[in-house]
Amino acid sequence: MSKVSQAEKIKYLLPFIFLSFILNPALSNSLQVVKTLKVQVKDTAKTQKKDTLKVQPKESTNLQVKDSAKAQGKDTSKIQVKDSTKVQPKDTLNNQLPDSVIYKQTNFSTEELIRGARLFNGLVYLGDKSINCVACHNTHVSDTLNWNPDALEISRKYLDKSARDLSRVLLKPIGPKMKLVHKGFQLTAGDIVLIKAYMNKFVGIGLKQNKPVITYLLLLIIASVLFLLSSVDVVIRKIYKDQRINWAILTFTTIFITWILAVNAIAFGRAKGFAPAQPIKFSHAVHAGQNKTDCNYCHYTAKISKTAGIPPGSVCLNCHFLVRNGTRSGATEIAKVLKAIDDKKPIEWVRIYKLPDFVFFSHEQHVSAGGITCDACHGNVKEMNRLYQVPDLSMGWCIDCHKTRKVNLSNEYYKTYYSDLYDSLKAGKIDSVRVTGIGGRDCGKCHY
């Protein structure tokens, strides 16, 4: 057997070497794939285990806890606490506080005072209705009798009292009239405190005056200005060529100014229709009309004195010692009489009828001797709730009465002092005697 040469061996090995060069990268790639697969399996296992065990709890649990606990805690617990505990105490929790705490409030903001004013004026609905205090207690000056005390009067009365005292009157009134009016009131302690705060402020405000109307004073000013302008144009400037316009203005304004001055000068010091507000709402229609109380019972000095006199509180007490509650004003006005008596202070009535100091007038002369009834001078007082001055009390009014009024000579006074006239009347020589016949027009009778 022949030996194989070295060249032939190499020749036979060349294909194997060639295949090895071809197959070596593939095997290396396959090994790398195997290694990568193993590494990937190891990595995925570890990564998944790390992701599932470490990442997920951190991201899912921690983040969720952070998001849910912290975010929700911030949104729900903190915000809700802020909204429910801080905001609500102003609106709701204050109302839930004990009334004893609410009644002690002394400081009020501008908004609270405005709400108190709106509550008093009935501009706030409490439940299904509003409570309008102004309907009974007026805040404006009125020339008609309002049986209820005005807002200023009740504000002054409760100025030194607490809101709790006011709540007792509003929610648990004693008198039958107040029980009827205040029936169904639904006021919380907070509402009453705000109303009381507004009432305290109203003491400084006072009753509002009615808006003034155009009076003769304004017309007098306008006429005077026109008179001056026309006078200047006539004398100095002469703007209008036709001076008849100026002379017409001068004539009209002169007549108007003279008329105003004359009328108001004659009426100076007279007070026809004067009806002042009295400290107590006394009604002549109730006492003299409804109850038929004689005028001389209260004005008991009219028959024996120059003046009729203002009845003292002791006269009122004769009836109101037992009668403590009126059907119209309740116990409010009667309580004023009783308080004045207890305090030993006179009731400060405002006088309505007043003559000048240079005029002499005697009620005794007219009531006792003349037999003149009260309504001859004071009007039908039996129908007046609020007394007012009926005549103007001018000298012409008195003289006209003396001209037309007949004298009753049958009483002892005239029989004694005017016996001649009485005998002539009895004999039929004269049919009547008027006041002017017995010196009713003598100046010295009234002006001495």
Image (cartoon, helix red, strand yellow):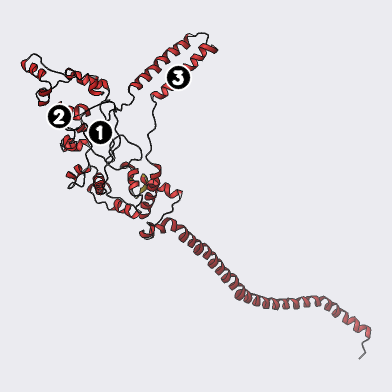
Q: Is residue 31 left or right of residue 10?
A: left
In the image, is residue 234 above or below residue 205? above
Please, what secondary structure does the residue beneath circle 2 have?
helix
Q: What residue sits 25% from the left and 49% below the top?
A: 342
Give whichever of discs 1 and 3 has the lower sequence position.
3
Label 3 CA crowd tier, 10 Å (few <14, some 14–19, many 20+):
some
Q: Quadrant of residue 121?
A: top left
Q: Which quadrant is the C terminus positioned in?
A: top left
Give whichever of discs 2 and 1 has the lower sequence position.
2
Residue linked to disc 1: 387
Amino acid type at mark 2: Ser
Q: Quadrant of residue 312?
A: top left
Which disc, if any, is residue 224? 3
Mark yes or no: residue 357 visible. Answer: yes
Q: Quadrant of residue 219?
A: top left
Mark 3 and mark 2: Cα distance apart in space: 51 Å
Residue linked to disc 2: 368
Q: Position of residue 320 (x, y in %)?
A: 19, 45
Mark yes or no: residue 239 visible. Answer: no
Mark 1 and mark 3: Cα distance apart in space: 38 Å
Amino acid type at mark 3: Ser
